[in-house]
Image (cartoon, rainbow, N blue to C red):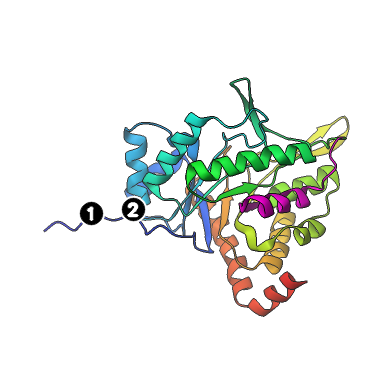
Amino acid sequence: MHSAPPTKPRAGPLPARAGIGLRHRHLPDFLRGQPAAAWLEVHSENYLVEGGPRLAQLERIRADYPLSCHGVGLSLGSAEGLDPAHLASLRQLYDRFEPGLVSDHLSWSVAGGVYASDLLPLPMTEAALEVVVDNLDRAQEALGRRLAVENPSNYVAFAASTIPEAEFLAELVRRTGCALLLDVNNLYVCRHNLGLDPAAWLARIPGEAVAEIHLAGHARLEVEGRPLLVDDHGSRVAEPVWRLYGEALRRLGPRPTLIEWDTALPPLEVLLAEAEHAQGCLDACAARPAACEAAHAG
């Protein structure tokens, strides 16, 4: 007697637990069994295909895990607007897999139809804010979903910037109803590179809008004799980033948390161990909700 085929988890918010990014190297592990991950995140653009084995594999895995889709190609900061064909492809993907969260970056990467191979920064100005608000409104309408916007990792500051980053993000939430994706590693990188104050930053964003947290590793380079941190997603989460994550949880309470690892990929067991560490932080925060609420109120 054959068992009934699995059905994908019911669409809904991601659990406030620790998940991992699903990368091609680890696909066989998930197709052979069910590794102990609370949820998975994929890069949306890797699945913008009409059919074939890639989508079939994701269908099988989606039957067992809640899913988040993280985009890198919307180019929310592009003054020329968004690509309608790209939006349509994303809508088709999201309608098919019903992810618990969809997200992209506060950046731009397209000009004149040419895509840059990076997430480029934008000045924090009123003009840039208007552009991103317009693009976010259009994206959320076209996708039929609330979009979470990730804070950037920055290496230089624009002299033209007039709005602090946290206030820029808060205004995006106020004007568009979007969510936020808090990348704690990006926050730490900006603290080191630009002198950003993470505590003040966390106090200024609307905490209730944070729908997901990212944790990742970074590289340390020497540039003209000075250290520069680069958000390369190629190593374990650094200890100072874990401490900043704890500070964020004390202020926000437990949130779905992703271990993000894209370069120099380790065995799956390493990612799961990092997720277990994050889960321990989430469990500790959940065990003292009064303290979390007090910190958030402060």
Q: Secondary structure at mark 1?
A: loop
On screen, 40 above or below 74?
below
Which amino acid type is shown beneath numbered disc 2?
Ala
Taking the spot 66% from the left edge, 46% from the top edge, the residue there is 217
Taking the spot 78% from the left edge, 56% from the top edge, the residue there is 201
User: Looking at the picture, how far across and down is residue 74, in whole percent?
Assistant: 57, 35
Asked if marks 1 and 2 touch (Cβ < 8 Å), the reply is yes
* Residue 175 sits inside the magenta stretch: yes
Quarter of the figure that contains the C terminus:
bottom right
Instruction: Say which label, 1 or 2, has the lower sequence index.
Output: 1
Q: Which residues are magenta?
A: 160-182
- Looking at the image, residue 196 sits to the left or right of residue 100; the answer is right
**Residue 65, image quadrant:** bottom left
* Residue 206 sits inside the magenta stretch: no
On screen, 216 above or below 135?
below
Q: How far, Cα to Cα, is label 1 from label 2?
A: 9 Å
Which amino acid type is shown beneath numbered disc 1?
Pro
- Looking at the image, residue 30 sits to the left or right of residue 144; the answer is left
Confirm whether residue 251 shows in the render.
Answer: yes
Taking the spot 79% from the left edge, 41% from the top edge, the residue there is 126
**Residue 154, image quadrant:** top right
User: Looking at the picture, how far across and down is residue 289, in whole percent?
Assistant: 64, 77
Confirm whether residue 106 shows in the render.
Answer: no
Q: Secondary structure at mark 2?
A: loop
Residue that numbered label 2 is attached to: 63
User: Looking at the picture, how far across and down is residue 261, in whole percent?
Assistant: 57, 44
Taking the spot 56% from the left edge, 53% from the top edge, the residue there is 258
User: Looking at the picture, how far across and down is residue 220, in whole percent?
Assistant: 76, 39
Residue that numbered label 1 is attached to: 5
